[in-house]
């Protein structure tokens, strides 16, 4: 293929310094350089090719994924990569695999819940991958409600062992990644029973397979749970099923940092505060928000570039048709997603800071901010993953028919992403946790307890319940404090209305259940406010680079005003704004789309994604879409032969009327 | 597996006659009996099993699909099935295949655009499947804008032939189903050029492959365009790419019903009115609406049954946990979709009547109702397919983690359904056509032209622009005329606001482009009103069967009030209702969810779907979900061996530290 850049005219119109924006997106020059180096390393290594992923059968696909994971480990060691670099390299390999669970769940679980002694023993094996571990929590019949798990760990003082057992079919461990075929060990969550008493769910380290021949140990039934959504997607992962038939493990394989069982079978709590566990949760959810911004920006990058290449209708006097990115219908769906990608990136970076802050406080014995931080990360995990999942699919639709081809990269991106809405807390369950926090905060308003952090605005409830928006012309909506106040007022008013309606019910709990759909909406309002306010904060920071601030200001306004339009009912029903102001916001939004249009391609270039990472014929940097789509088609296995398998058996007899045609 | 019915307690609580509802759903006793018989025929024939679909590679999958299509044809002939029965049988085979295009597009194109002579010749071959045809319209660079197609058909008077040619890469035919590997013939759309003049796009019958050896004829390059979204899904279809290198066809293979080229190369119109072509479009889109109600109801059936089986949280004193269908968060997402499935079914049946009506008018030379009918079917195609695609994915999410497994049936249902949003008119393009119709109708209001049919309400604009909703308590929202007026007022007001804003622009066309996102919202309001009004009409008809009317009334109200809540911004911003009335509607909605709850499982039983058709471990009639999920897992090819392929090469060396670990 000749070298072309069909998108060059789009890049010329940029009104900002793209290289500087790359640094802003990455978070720092150092972060940019690591990501840039690791993505190129992966893209240039033929062992990491992924263009054949959607045509492989499950076994080939899985074998291929094992090969890549092994090769990545080899490269990590050969190049002596740091932990940060290793994690980036694995990210750009872009294929779910057992290593994700080993590094992302098994190791952190031992770190968080193991004693110093346990950490010393198990982590040294895990760090060298002399053992491979997974995280066995969910069961066939039990997901969100961890306290409902059925697997038992019964202490036997005679042998100083726990007996791990699956008493029912529904107690089978189900879903853990890396479990089905690979892991040698697992952190297993089970009900601790000692001296006839059930002490609830605790974690245990259980060996599953022999380190000699990899065969499951006696009493262990283990396998893969079957094909999942998408062609390649998560089918590179061996999500597994696991049953125990009275499997015995030494007592010291219970993770004993927070509580322990003595030789005599006595259950005792340690003096380590339990709140520390929530610190880990904040950490994991913060990484999920960061992943959301990456996945959404990846889809948006593909859709923006293709929308600039694709032309349809509007030809005048035989000239070229209109680029679809110039249609307001396309802009009104695409640009809010572009703005959301930036918004999620910035709130993700802020969450990283928040995690550091709360960790320091916890270590100093200050637990005061924890509930607010916990609600904040739970809510942001829920909101960003839901919007990202829907946003990827919206980007696919914005690419028209061609978005339906695997060679567009979008079907796989969607299929591999959607589990994020379910794992690490189902998104609706998490929003209800946020709602509970909001109801508690509102109920304490009179008591002198001041809401903190991202919930501090609730302390201004008295003002926010009666303030009036004074927007009189469209440009008034460009004022950040006007936007912020409208979002704060909406969030507070929705929360207060819910609290009032709950107080009318026969009991608070019944009221909460009855109003839970409304509570979810109040929780969303709270989370959207946080994202809007962190975006506004970001724009107000000092930033180097020509035009950077202006572009981010535009994106910030698009993010906020498109949300206002989407949730217009919320703002109007709570009298935060009036219908005229709603119409003015919409008018301003259209003007903002026009402003962002000449910068759109450069704003996605700033993500600095390689063509390897995007893995999309539609999203190529050079915009050379059609020859690439055409080339990809001929790689399809069905095209290996001119006559399809089955022609002689099932097509020819039909055409030759060798089927009995009694009816005709 | 022992015989159980875990859902028996759910079925006991039904407050209506399920058998009678089955007839209502099917449309008539006769329609019910045909569907019931055909679905059982397919379900009981092992040749039609489909549980292995997601684990087959593309070649095996395609071969398998050819086998089923051949077997279906054999059974159709052996059993001497009628056209209606055959089409039902193919529907329940539930696998996209070349026959869909042969019967659904190739045959109708010849019927609609061929002369009597052409029909006689080609249809007799097609009816016996002595030739297999497809419909080659879209090109790599051209989709929605049919007038932009590049393929040429140049008349050569010397030989009395057309020369079919692909002048560019982007003119390659791209997407036609059945083209890639199977079809012997195609209706090809190309620019007709004669005597140096371009007469625009016309249809031609072109033979692609030899009837002897199935090899592509000289000058024809043809193949499959590659893997599409999902595992099995649309990958059973050979969507194809096709290029012509000066392929010659006899002049009489131009479809000449509406216009023709003479031996001398003169282009002439026939006296057949062109509007007849729109009749075919109405027909095809009407079938798409019917398919939408089937696809949505299938997903809803799975999600409702599983939501009644699945329990999570809420256990009291060690008792069972709460069924997730009892949570208001689940109800507020699931029950509007259940109501939508019924709503789409009824509007689909009405469209069938509308098609008959317009056909009779067209044949009598009455073209007056055509624009309104065309807008109506275009809009309903767009709205129902978009809601169905999103609704299937919502049902998948409502099934939690297990919905992500292919054995849930939902990932495949989604992947196979989403193209409906693009084919036969991109959904956004169609809504803009509706919007154009609305703007024209509004602009003619003063002129004495009375809007007809589903747009008749616009004739009441004067009243609807100033009427006030007089709801004062929640139950007032149960009055159908109150609901209807609110929806009519919303639709008229949004359309009038758009028309006013357009009139402020420098030209109507520029105004239309600038406001197109708002116009799409106005078009949606128009379409939703149609569906609401047809549901209300349905409920007011006489219907036999205990409790039927009451249940449909509840569903109709849920449909309308959940839309009102979703689009609250529309209703408030146009002052159709006030915030208090919005809150009352929401309160009434919650009460309706409680009413439908004990009937939910029986309302999906009324769809009369077999377990074969549902193809879902979660949606089984007997609710025996967990053993079935467990059983399905062990069929996964990865479980064929205890050690996975690749263990010796890629896992063992890692565990045994045979990789260089220079870093550690």
Image (tube, coloured by chain):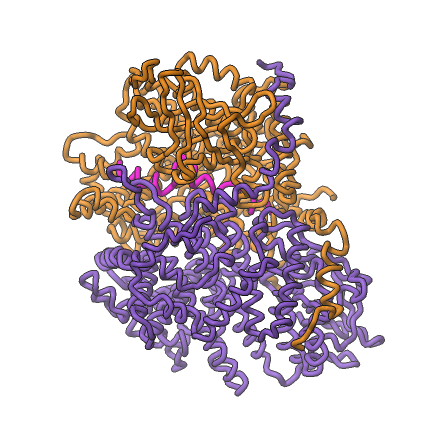
Chain colours: A orange, B purple
Quarter where residue B501 is shown: bottom left
Q: Main secondary structure of the magenta part?
A: helix
> Residue B393 at x, y = what percent?
46, 51
> Residue A514 at x, y = what percent?
24, 49
In the rendered structure, does residue A120 fall within the stretch colored magenta?
no
Q: Residue at x 63, y 49 (%)?
A: B227
Q: Nearer the viewer, residue A82 or A451?
A: A82
Left or right placement of residue A263 versus residue A599 in this view:
left
Which range is magenta? A408-437
Left or right placement of residue A226 versus residue A347 in this view:
right
In the rendered structure, does residue A430 fall within the stretch colored magenta?
yes
Can see residue B439?
Answer: no
Quarter where residue A159 is shown: top left
Q: Residue at x 52, y 81 (%)?
A: B359
Can see residue B155?
Answer: yes
> Residue B403 at x, y = what percent?
46, 46
- How many marks are shown on the rendered structure? 0
Q: Nearer the viewer, residue A518 or B271?
A: A518
């Amino acid at each position: 293929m000749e070298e072309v850049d069909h998108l060059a005219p789009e890049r010329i119109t940029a009104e900002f310094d793209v290289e500087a924006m790359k640094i802003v997106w990455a978070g720092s020059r150092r972060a940019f350089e690591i990501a840039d180096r690791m993505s190129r390393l992966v893209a240039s290594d033929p062992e990491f090719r992924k263009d054949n992923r959607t045509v492989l059968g499950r076994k080939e696909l899985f074998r291929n994924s094992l090969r890549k994971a092994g090769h990545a480990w080899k490269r990590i060691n050969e190049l002596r990569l740091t932990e940060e670099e290793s994690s980036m390299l694995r990210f750009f390999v872009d294929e779910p695999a057992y290593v994700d669970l080993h590094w992302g769940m098994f190791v952190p679980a031992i770190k968080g819940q193991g004693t110093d002694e346990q950490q010393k023993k198990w982590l040294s094996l895990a760090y060298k991958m002399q053992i491979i571990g997974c995280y066995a929590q969910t069961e066939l019949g039990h997901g969100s409600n961890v306290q409902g798990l059925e697997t038992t760990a019964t202490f036997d003082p005679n042998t100083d062992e726990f007996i791990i057992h699956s008493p029912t079919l529904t107690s089978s461990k189900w879903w853990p990644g890396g479990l089905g075929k690979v892991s040698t060990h697992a952190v297993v969550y089970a009900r601790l029973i000692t001296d006839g008493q059930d002490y609830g769910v605790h974690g245990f380290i259980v060996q599953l397979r022999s380190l000699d021949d990899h065969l499951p140990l006696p009493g262990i039934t283990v396998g893969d749970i079957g094909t999942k959504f998408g062609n390649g997607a998560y089918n590179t992962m061996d999500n597994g099923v696991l049953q125990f038939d009275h499997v015995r493990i030494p007592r010291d394989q219970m993770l004993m940092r927070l509580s322990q069982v003595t030789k005599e079978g006595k259950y005792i709590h340690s003096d380590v505060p339990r709140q520390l566990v929530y610190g880990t949760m904040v950490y994991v959810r913060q990484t999920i928000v960061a992943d959301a911004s990456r996945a959404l920006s990846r889809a948006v990058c593909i859709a923006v570039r293709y929308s600039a290449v694709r032309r349809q209708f509007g030809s005048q006097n035989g000239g070229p048709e209109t680029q679809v990115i110039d249609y307001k219908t396309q802009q009104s769906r695409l640009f809010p997603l572009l703005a959301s990608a930036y918004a999620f990136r910035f709130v993700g970076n802020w969450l990283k800071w928040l995690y550091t802050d709360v960790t320091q406080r916890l270590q100093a014995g200050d637990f005061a901010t924890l509930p607010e931080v916990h609600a904040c990360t739970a809510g942001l995990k829920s909101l960003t993953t839901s919007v990202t999942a829907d946003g990827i699919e919206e980007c696919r639709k914005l690419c028209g028919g061609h978005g339906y081809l695997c060679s567009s990269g979008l079907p796989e991106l969607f299929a591999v992403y959607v589990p994020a809405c379910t794992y690490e807390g189902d998104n609706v369950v998490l929003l209800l946790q946020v709602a509970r926090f909001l109801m508690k905060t509102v109920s304490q308003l009179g008591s002198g307890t001041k809401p903190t952090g991202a919930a501090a605005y609730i302390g201004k409830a008295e003002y926010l319940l009666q303030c009036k928006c004074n927007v009189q012309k469209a440009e008034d909506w460009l004022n950040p404090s006007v936007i912020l106040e409208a979002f704060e007022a909406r969030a507070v008013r929705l929360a207060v209305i819910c609290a009032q309606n709950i107080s009318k019910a026969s009991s608070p709990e019944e009221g909460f259940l009855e109003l839970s759909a409304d509570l979810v909406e109040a929780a969303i309002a709270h989370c959207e406010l946080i994202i809007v306010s962190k975006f506004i904060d970001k724009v107000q920071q000092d930033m180097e680079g020509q035009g950077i601030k202006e572009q981010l200001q535009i994106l910030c306004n698009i993010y906020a005003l498109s949300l206002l339009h989407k949730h217009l009912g919320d703002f109007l029903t709570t009298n935060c704004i009036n219908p005229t102001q709603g119409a003015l916001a919409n008018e301003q939004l259209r003007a903002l789309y026009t402003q962002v249009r000449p910068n759109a391609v450069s704003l996605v270039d700033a993500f600095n994604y390689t063509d390897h990472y995007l893995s999309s014929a539609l999203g190529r940097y050079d915009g050379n879409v059609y020859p690439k789509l055409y080339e990809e088609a001929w790689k399809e296995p069905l095209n290996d032969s001119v006559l399809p398998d089955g022609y002689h058996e099932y097509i020819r007899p039909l055409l030759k009327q060798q089927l009995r045609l009694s009816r005709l």
